[in-house]
Image (spheres, grey):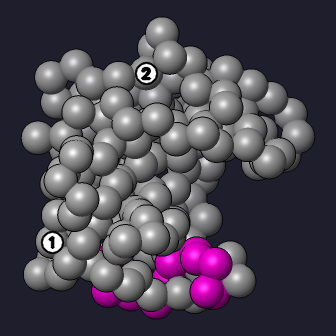
Amino acid sequence: YFTWDYPESSFQCTDDATTGINGDVITIGFKGVSNGKDQAGGIQTETRPGLGEGIDLSRCKAIKITATNKATEDVHMNIIVKNGNDWTWAENGGATAADPVEGERIIGAGETVDIVYYLTHATWKTLASNWEYTGTLEDLDDCRAIAFKVYGGDATPISGTLEITNFE
């Protein structure tokens, strides 16, 4: 069970009034997201709060979700995992049945899509990969946080909500 209430300072466009978890639905409310620095919205959970260590994902092949874009504009969405003592940031857009290429993920207005984030593929955007979708995850046995980030494709601000279900 994750609380999805761990703050992420770069999610400056999160609408706190509409972001949270209700039953099995994780909702990200966002106001004015764009492709600018710190112009993302999102939600994050610490995996083992206060324990100084994360959960072990080393035996897991993937994280799977269903995402529904309730906004009237297309949005970009990535998962972020933070692993190890340094909470090393890595992000990926995942794969879908219609688009199996991992990397940037765009979810159309009103679209619902099943997304798979493969943990062992070399398709993660990290500092070590110079922020290209070519990196691998390190310290999978110590995943400290998981987040979902929503942002726009250009400088035009977008507002709305995105729902995540079937998180596994």
Was residue 127 drawn as part of the magenta stretch in this picture?
yes
Disc 2 crowd, CA 10 A, few/some/many (<14, 14-19, 20+): many
Position of 86 relative to 4 (above/below): below
Query: How many angstroms separate mark 1 from mark 2 (CA)?
Result: 27 Å
The mark found on residue 56 in the picture is: 1
Q: Tell me which secondary structure the magenta stretch mostly adopts.
A: loop
Q: Mark 2 points at which residue?
A: 19
Task: Where is residue 101? Give x, y as percent.
Answer: 51, 77
Does dot 1 land on a helix, a strand or a loop? loop
Q: Which amino acid does label 2 sit on?
A: Thr
In this rendering, does residue 107 appear at all? Answer: no
**The one of 8 and 52 positioned closer to us in this rendering:** 52
Q: Magenta segment, which residues?
A: 119-129
Position of 32 relative to 36 (above/below): above
Look at discs 1 and 2 and give the one toward the viewer.
Answer: 1
**The one of 119 and 104 positioned closer to us in this rendering:** 119
**The one of 41 and 64 positioned closer to us in this rendering:** 41
Disc 1 crowd, CA 10 A, few/some/many (<14, 14-19, 20+): some
Was residue 84 drawn as part of the magenta stretch in this picture?
no
Farthest residue toward the top?
17
In this rendering, does residue 48 appear at all? Answer: yes
Does dot 2 land on a helix, a strand or a loop? loop
The mark found on residue 81 in the picture is: none
Task: Where is residue 80? Give x, y as percent.
Answer: 46, 59
Task: Where is residue 31? Give x, y as percent.
Answer: 67, 21
Task: Where is residue 14? Give x, y as percent.
Answer: 58, 26
Residue drawn at point x = 31 percent, y = 81 percent: 139
**The one of 70 and 98 positioned closer to us in this rendering:** 70
Q: Image quadrant for the C terminus?
A: bottom left
Residue drawn at point x = 51 percent, y = 78 percent: 124
